[in-house]
Amino acid sequence: MTNPQKHTHPVSDTVFRAVYDSPASLPGLHKWVTSDEDVRQIEELLGMPPKTIGAPLWVSGDRKHCPNCDRQTNWLDIVSSALDQVHSREMIARVILGEQKFVNTEAPRAIADLKCFRCQTAIENIRSFKCHNWAYADTEFLEVLRVMETKEQLN
């Protein structure tokens, strides 16, 4: 049975900025940014012109590298896995480049069904990922930010 509670919420720029500005809020032992070389590969996979993605693509987890080939795991693995299994190129591009901001309140033990781009080994150590339109925050923190934003709008 699936959980009917939604974990991903569209939010205002103000709330998003409060969550996004702190990479330390990402779950896992390590936090790192996808290399420029791999960002260019993502653009190619998605059919985007080179240099379309300019914002940092953050990743967090308990281990940074594939256990089989030692390649650094990052958004390239996430995008290629998503394209293979669930999401369209357009949907992924909309998440990375679109105007709507999203915050996910679920901090998983690992991102499901993730495979290494190079060797296709299952990756089970990536906990979170974010870009300029996507971030993670716990539910309570998100609610506090919404209350603050509402009060600010009333003043």
Image (cartoon, grey):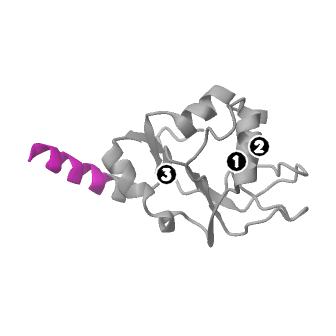
The range drawn in magenta is 143-155
What secondary structure do most residues of the magenta stretch adopt?
Answer: helix
Which quadrant, please, contains the N terminus? top right
**Outermost left residue:** 155
Q: Residue furthest bottom?
A: 29
Tag 3 or tag 1, which sits nearer the N-term? 1
Per the model, the C-alpha gap separating discs 1 and 3 is: 18 Å
**The disc label shown at residue 39, or none:** 1
Q: Secondary structure at mark 2?
A: helix
Q: Secondary structure at mark 1?
A: helix
Q: Residue at x 50, y 46 (%)?
A: 134
Inter-mark Cα distance, 1 to 2: 5 Å
Secondary structure found at label 3? strand
Position of 55 relative to 62 (above/below)? above
The alpha-carbon separation of the residues under discs 2 and 3 comes to: 22 Å
Q: Disc 2 designates what residue?
A: 41
